[in-house]
Image (cartoon, grey):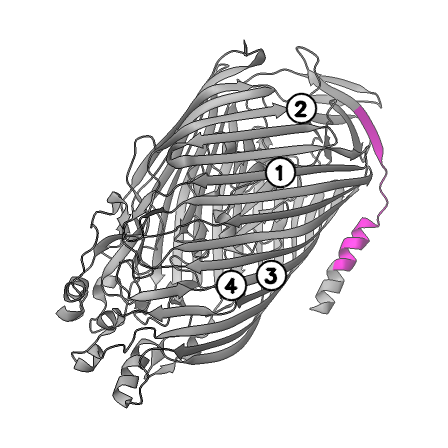
Amino acid sequence: MRKIFTLIYAILFAGLSVSFGQQYIEGKVVDAGDGQPLPGATIKVRGSTEGTTTDFNGVFSLKFTGNYPLRLQFSYLGYQSRELTVSREEFLSVGLSPSSAFLAEVVVSARRRDETALEVPIPVSVVGGGKIEETGAFNVNRVKELVPTVQLYSSNPRNTTLNIRGLGSTFGLTNDGIDPGVGFYVDGVYYARPAVTTLDFIDIDRIEVLRGPQGTLFGKNTTAGAFNITTRKASFDPSSSFETSFGKYGFVQAKSSVTGGLIADKLAGRISFSGTHRNGTIYNVARDEHVNTLNNIGFRGQLLFTPNEDIDITLIGDISSQKPNGYAQVFAGVVRTQRPEFRQFDQIIADLDYELPGRNPFDRVIDHDTPWRSLNQLGGLSVNADFHFAGGTLTSTTAWRYWNWGPSNDRDFTGLPVLNLSQAPSRHDQWSQEIRYAGEISSRLSAVLGVFVLWQDLKSDPVHTQESGAAQWRFAQNTQDPLWQTPGLLEGYGIKTTNRLKSFSGAVFANIDWEVSEVFHVLPGIRFNYDTKDVDYKRETYGGLETDDPDLLALKDRVYSDQQFTTDVNNTNFSGQLTLKYQPVSSFNAYGTFSTAYKPIGVNLGGLPTENGEPLLDLAEVEPEYVTHFEVGFKSKPAPNASLNFTAYNTSIKDFQTVVQTPELGVNRGYLSNADKVRVRGAELEGNVYFGEHFSFFGAAAYTEGKYVKFENAPVPLEEVGGEQAFKDVSGGRLPGISRWAGSLGGELTSASVDFWRQNGTFFFGFDSFFRSGFSSSPSPSRYLNVPGYGIFNARAGFRAVEGLSVFVWGRNILDKDYYEQLLPAGGSAGHYAAVLGDPVTYGVTLKYEFR
């Protein structure tokens, strides 16, 4: 490994030591109508990666290599793009015409440099910060309604699954021993914990959702895709914004951001805040309180240091905290298992003289005796340094991040004292370093070359606890032996687990863009991974009836038992891709990609199933996934006021990593295993159009088909628990969490520019909607654990000021659709299951003040 890293560093710095001839061209970009400067306009040298943006006064200075004449491209959001040929050194004055009838070029950094989305031969969806704010999409769960290829399932922040096209992480309860397949990046920093997806966004500029393997472009391997999030940067020009929203269920959300120069042309700062509160939407009759509240707060600060024109150094610190009374799941139904009658859920609760508070989950009533708590804290520091050379940029990103997790759950989903405690408090630290060059190598060759390392330390803090209550004996009882009824046998009986996972990931990666001709590009990429994981797991029983009776001890061992193991695993692999790009005109780009990818080797951290009382140690390790991916598609602007993109793909995965649910209570989050082979294929269509000056429209549709090609030893679904076989062949069955059809549709109608409240702006009405067909909510296909399809409709209307006070009213799920987000079987497989409910109708008002 040391030789490989040394070689890559040598290649990077050797390439950067080449001398380039540098020239400068300066100018100003203004509104062609009134002559006002356009800050943040993009200027690019056509056919290269060289470019820059205008400052607050619309002025730019562009450094380029080569000779005159030069073809420059100018673009600005809401304005017609323009190209200009420059034949000599001169100060340029460029006017752009505003027109909502033309789509502004969307600039993305998916290939680690700024370029228009149409030029990038990758299926990527872009959601701007303005749309995120106005649609109320303040976290990933809301963004998925705007990007139908994204799936998010969360029964609490730890047990969160973020998938793209149905792939990425295991469905259901999370096992920390495997890596996510969807990379989550914020300002170039990789976030390892899926719990970040439940937090509020803070001061977002844009979100890019890249679909398909992206390991030759990003530091951490991303076998299913990536979330590439860019926040708003510190600026030397002062500006500020303040926003407050009020709504149903006591909803209050406040956001603010302030930026400006601290030392002229050298140091600028930005500080941002977001806080959200909402009362609960579910009533706990036992505790006389509403649960599933929102209680989020986050801060983000940054300093931008520019010692000269060629160096930008950004220091970013953030801290976010989530303290809801919530993530409670609601009883949703009962499945008759194949166990004897006395082990059926309804018979069990009848014997215990217990009645549920209701059997309609959309009554939103529970009687859970254990409080729900989800303390979720994340934060960190990062330093990003960009060194701009002629034709490219060398970037160094250094980061440390932490995660604190303090939960309390009622995993039996009833008011009975069955599982009194189910808690897995944890602490996670990560340290990462990426060094990357993105830019030109020659006139026809550009590249991304990088080195990435990641260290992680995840441990129980201090112990994970699962403890039985007085009613546990009846749920655990698997024979008619009267000893099960021994008073106090299982009351207070539980397990305390200490575990620690130390891991290291190292990678070198490269992605080349070879311009064979002006219209045809070949883009090969390669990646080398090295991963290690060290696990120390120890579980000890405690409590319950103090006894020496071997028969009673045997009953206790059937519920919980001591378990201890250590494992040390590592693996290396190569992966890569080949993309062909054909762009005969600037408004059309066709591409085709073949790629391979690996998800690293996994380890089990939630306990192992047992046989004859002994843990099955051969299940401690989980084989790495091997991904083979094909994709073809096109991006286009069929008219100046419209865009249309299409892609079709086929992804096959060998040794697919999945969670296996087991009736054993000690394996409280299931255990990891491999399915021999799965396949996901589909097609996606998305577009935008402007009708005249005042109406815009967007839509996206996705067809996704996912199935187990071969999985002969899958766990049985809930309704088959207790049958003759503990495993079954589910080959040909559908993968969980994948809707065959999903889509989003929205638009906005705006007025002509008006003066209102002594402010210039526009009145607007906007709407967005999301729909998806039904999907399986069970790792093995079940007749019962299936979520019906649903659709939701959101709308907003108000006044948007150019500068000053904007006001609008909004409503979410305004048709008040009842829908499930996920179904989960209770621990122990007695037959009952619970649901994560979607939010009911909410509405409110937002006031936003901006100063520039």
Q: Whole-Å distance between the Cαs marked 4 and 3?
A: 10 Å
Based on the picture, tell me whether residue 16 belongs to the magenta stretch.
yes
Residue type for callout 4:
Ser
Lower sequence index among marks 3 and 2 = 3
Q: Are marks 3 and 2 in contact (CB under 8 Å)?
A: no
Cα separation, mark 1 vs mark 3, equals: 24 Å
Residue type at mark 2? Answer: Arg
Q: Callout 4 environment at 10 Å: few (<14), some (14 to 19), or many (20+)?
A: many
Q: Earlier in the sequence, mark 2 or mark 1?
A: 1
| Residue interval drawn in magenta | 9-26
| Distance of label 3 from label 2 (alpha carbons) | 38 Å
Q: Is residue 549 above or below residue 492?
A: below
Q: Earlier in the sequence, mark 4 or mark 1?
A: 1
Comes first in the chain, label 2 or label 4: 4
Q: How many marks can you see?
A: 4
Which residue corresponds to mark 3?
A: 429
Residue with the mark numbered 1: 272
Residue 336: which quarter of the image?
bottom left
In percent of the image, x 53 and y 61: which residue is there? 598
Mark 2: few/some/many CA within 10 Å (<14, 14-19, 20+): few
Q: Which residue is mark 4?
A: 426
Give coordinates of residue 829: x percent, y percent: 26, 65
Q: Amino acid at mark 1?
A: Ser
- For the residues labelled 2 and 4, the Cα–Cα distance comes to 43 Å
Residue 153 in the image, given as x and y percentages of width and height: 40, 50
